[in-house]
Amino acid sequence: MNPERLEQLARELLAGRLDLSAFVLEASQPATADLNEAQIDLDRRRRCGYPEVVYGEGKTVGTLERICATQLAAGIEVLITRASPEQAAYLKTRFAEAHYNPTGRTLRISPQTPAAAAPAGKVVVVTAGTSDLPVAEEARETLLWMGAHVTMVHDVGVAGPHRLRERLAEFEGADAIVVIAGMEGALPSVVGGYVACPVIAVPTSVGYGASLGGFAALLSMLNSCAANVTVVNIDAGFKGGYVAGLIAHGAARRRDST
């Protein structure tokens, strides 16, 4: 642990904002846990605001089990993305509290002594069509892991523009909006024209041949005329959710400080 963080912990202990057991637990932790095939960053919450997220594809169930056990021992809530049903089934036999979302292919596990809740903020996740649900669920689970309040608005694509207008009241008070769309990828621009917060556009690989596996939607979103729209990679529900969560967290923290 670096000296600045140790000094901060000591000041919190002396001021009574941190109990002795919590001080000892955090002060005694190394910055990295060496698991041979994986190096677990235990210091990322301090540096970046949130802990390390585990990408499940290509990892053995044994490796995932060791990573989960290491993070949980450090008081870190586990988030695994792109977890297969087979990986999830195995991990649920080892960690009874594991929650698997088969649509979003995510797995979350809460430690017995979780870290104190941070300001959450509000994020709305919007899908153009039902086929975009896997990406939307990955974004939603990411936001829940980050502690955000999440509202889901499904199947309001531009083929039926009246459906979006009927749901606009649910966007009020949002700190950020994640808009997930395939095909021509037009929905983020439309949403951006209705709201005063950042819109995180997530193109999906949903669509017929000329959609080029989401590349057409990606280019359309990158060329959005709505000034509040920014774009992440194709099918990147985690990245869209994470960026929106950071924005919401910052907004909530500013509200709490006023």
Image: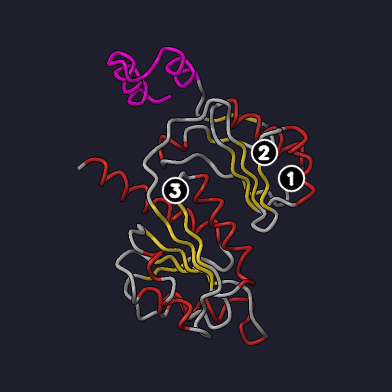
Residue 237 placement (x, y as % from top left) = 55, 60
Mark 2 crowd level (few <14, some 14–19, many ≥20, 10 Å Cα): some
The residue under label 2 is: 98
Mark 2 touches mark 1? (CB < 8 Å):
yes
Where residue 16 sits, quadrant-wise, is: top left
Mark 3 crowd level (few <14, some 14–19, many ≥20, 10 Å Cα): many
Q: Secondary structure at mark 2?
A: loop
Q: Nearer the viewer, mark 1 or mark 3?
A: 3
The residue under label 3 is: 148
Q: Amino acid at mark 2?
A: Ala
Residue 24 placement (x, y as % from top left) = 46, 14
The residue under label 1 is: 88
Q: The N terminus is located in which quarter?
A: top left
Of residue 212 and residue 195, the one placed in the foreground of this image is: 195
SS assignment for the magenta stretch, majority: helix
Where residue 66 sits, quadrant-wise, is: top right
The structure residue drawn at horizontal position 64% and vertical position 72%, both measured from the top left corner, is 131
**In the figure, 163 relative to 26: above or below?**
below
